[in-house]
Image (spheres, rainbow, N blue to C red):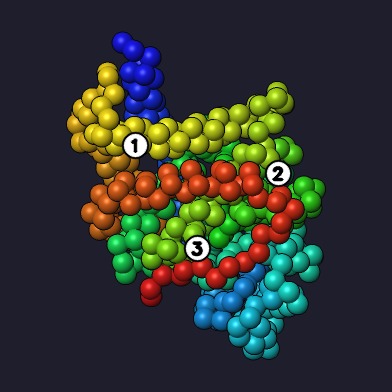
Amino acid sequence: MSWIALLWSSAIKFVFYYPLFMSYLWMIGALIFYWKERQDPPYQQPDALPRYPKVAVLIPCFNEGENADETIRHALQLDYPDFEVIAINDGSSDNTGEVLDRLASQYEKLRVVHLAQNQGKAMGLQAGSLMTDAEFLIGIDGDALLDPHAAKWMIRHFLEDSTVAAVTGNPRIRTRSTLLGRIQVGEFSSIVGMIKRAQRTFGRLFTVSGVITAFRKSAVHQVDYWSPNMLTEDIDITWKLQRAGWDVRFEPNALVWILMPETMNGLWKQRLRWAMGGAQVLVKNIDVFFKPKLNFLWPLMLELCLTLVWSYLMLIMAVMWLLHFILPIPGLTVVSSPFLPYGSGILLGATCLIQFALSKWMDSRYEPSLGKNYYWMIWYPFVFWLITITATIVAFPKVLLRNDGKRARWISPDRGIR
């Protein structure tokens, strides 16, 4: 066998076995987590807490004039004895400021902070946290609808363990009018939720969900708050806290309803930003491999590195496979391609469907009608894998060329069709 054929064969095995191995690892980990999770009462009926420390709900807003009213009103309906809502108008150019001021005049629990210029979500969160004497902060987005019981579900973790610095919740998708929206409903269950369950079972979380996470303010203060130059402040703060020795947890009962892109352009911009944020974290934290005291983060960093390698191998293999039709390469055959539905492709596809079914079964605890969405998930590998792989490939060189000191400011994202 020639060296080219040997490399091709090894690359195919890695491209095939890596996602297959990770998929079954996620399913096993999620099932273990679910076995413990199902011992909890239904999420609508959280147990009473031994005490109720003050909570501040932080809502950074940039050009949220259409969503702020609904978001604020839901946050003010929080079923928790002692809380306040702080909305941060981050230099919006629309009527967000007027909407927030009008609401502040109606609700005693609402305070509004106006920043003169757009500073980015990280600075918005920091500004809000410095305005409150609450030790526990719940950060949500300006278009998110917070479940009334979310605070009780998350605060219990802080009361149980003083080493817990953050508890991330369970985002649910509101936008379901298009194929992209319906696929994302399943994605957040079968991919996002399942991975978080598995990561908590086997070790640490890669990231909290920026759209709903509760923080211990003293812990955030210790690590110097959120980094203003990171494109995904949620991933960065997760690693900063865990590197400092704090624990980060996942609470699937803490729900929030969010809007997601329903156009290809909006979806691409979102996934590229996520991929660039992941690449920034990789570059910033690659040194954990040389610090034995941080060995609990090695599995996360190894997975991040392997995923990057896997994405570039997919690109190389795709190019070689296409070139093979123009200029045949000795030792390589079309049958060996992972892009055709032969045995390996069928096994991968079947594994995906098993994963989707398992995740929907677990998350039906929170959305009883979730199983109706199963049909649309057959399109996930064709649409989202391609976007995710492409975004990962594009993101890494963009991050390497990016000025690290550049502040990550807001843009107005695609919020779907409602």
**Residue that badge 3 annotates:** 256
Out of 350 and 55, give the one closest to the viewer: 350
Give me the C-alpha separation between circle 1 and circle 2.
37 Å
Q: Position of residue 282 (x, y in %)?
A: 61, 39
Whether pointer 3 and pointer 1 mark residues with C-beta atoms closer than 8 Å, the reply is no
**Residue that badge 1 annotates:** 318
Q: Is residue 89 above or below residue 206?
A: below
Q: Secondary structure at mark 2?
A: helix
Give me the C-alpha separation between circle 2 and circle 3.
24 Å
Give the residue displayed 50% in from the left and 63% down from the top: 256
Few, some or many residues within 10 Å of mark 1 (<14, 14–19, 20+): some
Out of 98 and 263, give the one closest to the viewer: 263
Q: Earlier in the sequence, mark 2 or mark 3?
A: 2
Few, some or many residues within 10 Å of mark 2 (<14, 14–19, 20+): many
Q: Residue furthest front?
A: 327
Out of 333 and 296, give the one closest to the viewer: 333
Give the residue displayed 57% in from the left and 44% down from the top: 397
**Residue that badge 2 annotates:** 240
Q: Earlier in the sequence, mark 1 or mark 2?
A: 2
Give the residue displayed 50% in from the left and 53% down from the top: 272
- The dot on residue 404 is none
How many numbered dots are placed on residues in this image?
Answer: 3
Out of 397 and 219, give the one closest to the viewer: 397
Q: Secondary structure at mark 1?
A: helix
Q: Is residue 137 visible?
A: no
Q: Position of residue 200 (x, y in %)?
A: 53, 38
Name which quarter of the figure residue 31 lies in.
top left
Q: Position of residue 251 (x, y in %)?
A: 53, 50
* Residue type at the position of mark 3: Val
